[in-house]
Amino acid sequence: MIGRKKELAVLADCIAADRSRLVVVYGRRRVGKTFLVREAFDYHFTFTHTGLENGSLREQLSAFWSSLRRQCHVDSPVPRNWMEAFESLKDAIEVSGDARKTIFLDELPWMDTRNSGFVKAIEAFWNGWASARKDVMMVVCGSAAAWMSKKILHNRGGLFNRANRTIRLEPFTLAECEAFALAEGLVMDRKDLVAAYMVFGGAPYYWSLLDRGESLSQNIDRLFFSEGAELADEFGRLYKSVFASPEPYIAAVSALGRKKAGMTREELAAAIPGAANDGTLTETLRNLETSGFVRRYVETGNSRKGSVFQLIDNYTLFFFQFVQGRSGRDSAFWSHMLHDSRRTAWEGLAFERVCLRHSAQIKAALGISGIETKESAWRCSSRDPDVKGAQIDLVIERADRVVNLCEMKFCSEQFSIDAGYAASLREKVGAFKRETGTRANCHLTFVTTYGLRRNKYSSIAQSEVTLDDLFRP
């Protein structure tokens, strides 16, 4: 298995425990949750079941009973409700010859249909029976991170504080994607790997669809733009799998996708037709953040303005920019965009998002992993026309009185700073100091593909981070 060492260690520890254990695994669609659990248990479970997407209560119960009948040979009738279903599961577990009774319930949120009583039933099963034994290992899993958080992890009823271990499965890092590509025989240098990450993010499933006999552009054309392309409709499936009512979430990310630096709650409410700056928007933003689609930050030197919400999901950004409404119209669309200015502009934005996902690697490259830091962003609110629109997407404030102002550039060769850009950088740093009132030393840090080209202006940068640094484990 590629990566996942910490997660496998957690599961191994629970398997070896001398008491019953409840483990919660959650993370976005396509991130590899099911594969992780199956590999950890070597595909052997006393009982395993996956909920039905969009299934009714009757359909969910019938499918659960079918799994029981097939795996545990129960002869009870189809349960009428979830209490009866879990009673049948108890009976099956009690007669099992497995020393460690392993139960894996996948896509748990799909089983919880409206007014089904599912959560109450699983509470009763765990609290009233399984937790009182020493031999039950139950793993519950779901893509709907908001549901898993509210109904299981932060349950206000019988499941409150009952999970023994929690695994939030994150997308692969660049280093893990590189290892995956090597294992799959994909011939890609690191620039291509980053370019693929800009489109697919770190979702292992998307990477598994790449054909090693095709170039990256050919793969993207096949997966997004050809007739019946496999990922052309992934956007709808993705948000429906994570959110029971996806419409407000799609509206929010659609609005955020139009603002590079993100929006405050007030700005977002004004940008969504019919939306209000109320509790519903609060829940929408919290769930988007929990699910990893959005990051929340406070602008450096502007804490009174409140949090800013920024869309950082690579696939969603790519979909909005290029895929929406284009599938099947030009089967070689991405290849034809090779030298298009729109693609170049998007690459700059997408590379910034990749860097934000790898801030730990940037700090390691700067040698400040052991220093307390705070990461944020900054947008210029000055009316000074010389610095109008200036922004810094990654500001690293350090406890040693240094602030790294990170400029991120994706290019095909060493990046060259000319006289005009050097002057712009000085103005930006000056504006940052004036508006934030910082007394720290401001260091310009360039995160680039192949480093800076040495010339009379390159010394304006105090530090550099290259593509290779982003691939640190």
Image: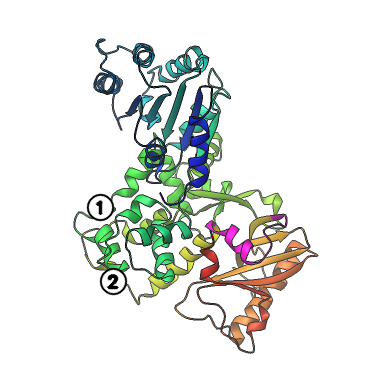
The disc at residue 277 is none
Magenta-highlighted residues: 357-373
What type is the residue that disc 1 sits on? Glu
Residue nearest the viewer, comparing 161 with 223 = 161
Number of other residues with Cα within 10 Å of mark 2, as a class: few under 14, some 14 to 19, many 20 or more? some
**Residue picked out by circle 1:** 230
Q: Residue furthest left?
A: 227
Q: Residue furthest bottom?
A: 456
Number of labelled discs? 2
What type is the residue that disc 2 sits on? Ser
Residue nearest the viewer, comparing 328 with 381 = 328
Relative to 231, say whether 125 is above or below: above
Q: Residue furthest right?
A: 439
- Residue 278, position in %: x, y? 56, 36
User: In the rendered structure, are the residues bearing label 1 and label 2 in contact, judged by CB atoms less than 8 Å apart?
Assistant: no
Q: At x 54% / y 18%, what residue is drawn? A: 157
**Residue picked out by circle 2:** 335
Q: Quote the CA–CA distance across marks 1 and 2.
A: 18 Å
- Residue 355, position in %: x, y? 53, 62
Q: Is residue 413 magenta?
A: no
Instruction: Report if residue 181 is visible in the image.
Output: yes
